[in-house]
Image (cartoon, helix red, strand yellow):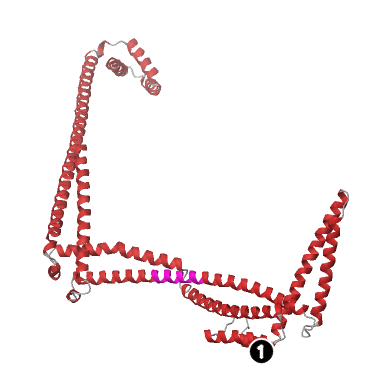
Amino acid sequence: MDERKNTIRELEKKKQADIEGRIRLLERFGETLFQRIGEGEHFLLNTGDAAGAMLIEYRRMQNDISLAVGNIRSIEATMEKLAKLEESISEKEAEYSRKEKKLGELHADLGKALLLTADSGEISGSLRQQEEILLEKIEGQEKKLVELEDKEGGIFKWLGKNAQMAVSKALLLKNKTALQRVYRNTGEKYLSDRPEVLAETGQDIDLNESSSKDADGERQNKEGGISALETDELEGDASDAAVEALELRRLMSSLADDLLTLRDERRNIKEILGTAGTPSRRIQGLEKQIMQIKDKLPGVCFRFGVLATEGNGSLSSLVLEEDKPVLERAKLLKVRIAGEELEIEKLNAVISIDIEKSGIEKMNRAIIGQRQKIADAEEAITGLERRITESEKRIKELAGFINSNSGTITDTGIKEDHGRENTEDGEINRDSKTGDSKKGRDPGKSGGIKGSRSEKGSGAGSKKTTG
């Protein structure tokens, strides 16, 4: 039994291997035929048979895969473009911050130069007053720091000196920062009070707004700004700072326009990507769709290859001489699979027969056992019947003995026997006494009564003997 089951397992493995080999063979063959058809062989679409339906299904699935792949590439390209835009925006923002910082320094240099010019009547008195106050505070703080540095003493004085120096340094830094702010405001106000210069150079700088300018316009703005400054009464460092500040403003204005354009483009891309979920989820959904189609595609190719091997009329023109080995191999595998299935069925039938025979043997053994039980029961019944017959025979013998010797039984024996009956059966004893009392006056019937009591006594004796 075990050997046959092992044989069945081996046959099952061979059959499975042959089935898988035949499926792969016909899948490749069907795919080859589909590729051989290409976009042609439209006659298959008009036949209305299974081959035409499979060709339509194959082309639809291939088209769905191409569309999904194209959408994935488009999303990836858009995401890559967005990443480059983010990088460009970050770089230009960093550049704008550097230029803005530099422009603040130039404004401060220009304001300082203007405040140093005694004849500069266009500087407001409040700015000069602020400068003077801050310079006096700075000078005082610096002197105080020098005095504290030279001051000597014990540990407590040293602690106090350090605390005072820390306060003085903080105030000194605050005043210097305020002074730089005054200088920067002075230079910025000086340029802002000349709208003809700023208008010619296009210096309305704002990261959220921009104006379109070509290269010629930018060059004209630069030349106009410089020529306008040359008409002002600026000399030395003030003139250099003003020219450099205006040039830097022009560059920052162009940079702001670029940033605005890049941000608009980034916003449009984000709107496109965000219309149907996040890009990563869209790509995952498309990849899942492609996998599902690819899982079904081999089945279509396999069925198409099966149709070709079965001699489908509409596919006969597609099968070439070079395909004969494939057809023969597919036929051989089909025959081998059928033979293996038959062998497995035969072995299973043999095993089933053996199982049925084993069941019959068990039932036959059960029948024999039951028959043996019946024989034993019949033998027991026969023995019991024999004992019953012997007992009945013994009873007859004893009854005959009683009948033949009824006249010789004495009254004493009857009484003794009657007393024994009363002992054995109290109810019968009471009935007997009642009868005696009623019939004792009839001397003619007393002997009959004694005889019947003697018979009863003999019967009791026979029962004891039988027992």
Residue at which label 1 appears: 196
Quarter residue 259 falls in: bottom right
Query: Which region shows up in magenta?
Result: 72-85
Q: Locate the C terminus by quadrant.
A: top left
Q: Is residue 320 left or right of residue 126?
A: left
How many neighbours does mark 1 have within 10 angstroms: few (below 14), some (14-19), or many (20 or more)?
some
Residue 214 visible in the current orientation: no
Q: Locate the N terminus by quadrant.
A: top left
Q: Is residue 246 above or below residue 136?
A: below
Residue 322 visible in the current orientation: yes
Q: Amino acid at mark 1?
A: Glu
What residue lies at 56% left-to-right and 84% top-to-bottom?
Answer: 219
Point out residue 295 in the picture as x, y percentages from the top left corner: 30, 61
Quarter residue 55 falls in: bottom left
Quarter residue 207 falls in: bottom right
Q: Is residue 194 magenta?
A: no
Q: Main secondary structure of the magenta part?
A: helix
Judging from the image, what secondary structure is the residue with disc 1 in?
helix
Q: Is residue 3 left or right of residue 72?
A: left
Point out residue 144 in the picture as x, y percentages from the top left corner: 85, 62
Q: Is residue 249 above or below residue 66?
A: below
